[in-house]
Amino acid sequence: MRFAVALLALAVAACAAGPSARDRYARVLTPTASPSRVVATELAFARLAQEDGQWTAFREYAAAGSVMFVPEPVDARDWLKNRANPAQAVAWQPHHVWSSCDGTLAVTRGAWQRADGSVGYFTTVWQRQRDGEYRWILDQGDVLESPLEEPEFVRTDVADCPQRDVAAELRAQAERSRPAAGGTYFDQVSGDSSLFLTFVVSPDLSRHWKLMLNRDGKMIDAMSGSVAAPGGE
C-alpha cells in the first residue's frame, strides 16, 4: 500500500512540475535496453567458467527453461545437473550484442577457444529476469577453421522502440520470415516485439536461425546462420 501511495505521489508531482518532470517519471517506469549490462554479464559468465568450472558457470547463469544443443536440443538445467566440469574450461569473449528496445531480451555473439587449440563461435540469448539480472535462455555454437577476428570493442545494436499498436504486426513480420520450414522451433521474442530470434532444429539436427530487429516500424535482418547436421558437410 505504501508503495502504491508513493507512486501516486510521484505521478502527481510529475504533473505539477511540467512536461520535463513527467518525461523523467516515464523513463523511470519504462524498461530500457542495457547492452553494457548484458556484456558485463557475459564477461562474468566467462570468468566464472575459468575460476569455478565450465558447467558450474553454465548452471549458475541458466534461466528456467533454458535450452542448449548437444547436438540435440536438451533442457539445459536437466542436462547440466551434477555434470562434472572438464579439466580445462572453454574460454570465450563477446564481440557483438543486439538488444530489444525494452531490454527484456538480448543476443550476444563472439569467439571461443579450447585448450586443445580448436576455435569457434557462440550465440547466446539473454533474458532479463524479474530481479533485473540477465540469464541465458538459449546457447549454441560451432567450430571454425580459423578464429574470428577480435574487434577493438564490443559492437552494440539496439532495436527501435515500437509503438504499442504495431507490436503484433512486428511479430507477424518476423514469423513470416522464419528460416527452414519444418523441424522444432525455439523462437525468442522480446516483451515489446522489437527483437525476434527464430531458431529451428531440423529433423537431421542441423540448426538454422535468423535474428531480426525493429527499424522504422519494420523487422530487418540483423544476423543469421546455420550449423550442419552432425557428420554432415
Image (tube, rainbow, N blue to C red):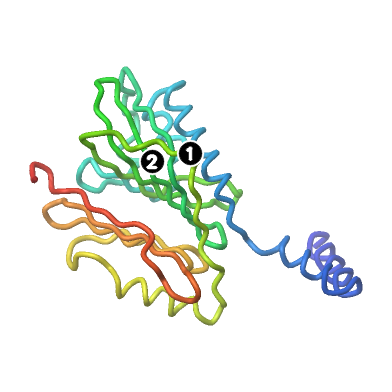
Q: Is residue 111 or residue 132 the one in the foreground?
A: 111
Tell me the element at label 2: strand
Q: Is residue 27 left or right of residue 200?
A: right
Assess whether mark 2 and mark 1 are in contact (beta carbons under 8 angstroms).
Answer: yes
**Structural distance between the alpha carbons of marks 1 and 2:** 10 Å
The residue tagged 2 is 110
Q: Is residue 35 left or right of residue 84?
A: right
Residue occupying image coordinates x 83% and y 74%: 19
Placement of 92 over or under 129, stated as above or below: above
- Give amino acid for label 2: Gly
What percent of the width, then of the height, locates residue 74?
27, 46
What percent of the width, then of the height, locates residue 124?
39, 46
The residue tagged 1 is 42
| Residue farthest bottom in this picture | 165
Residue occupying image coordinates x 37% and y 76%: 173
Residue occupying image coordinates x 23% and y 37%: 144
- Give amino acid for label 1: Glu
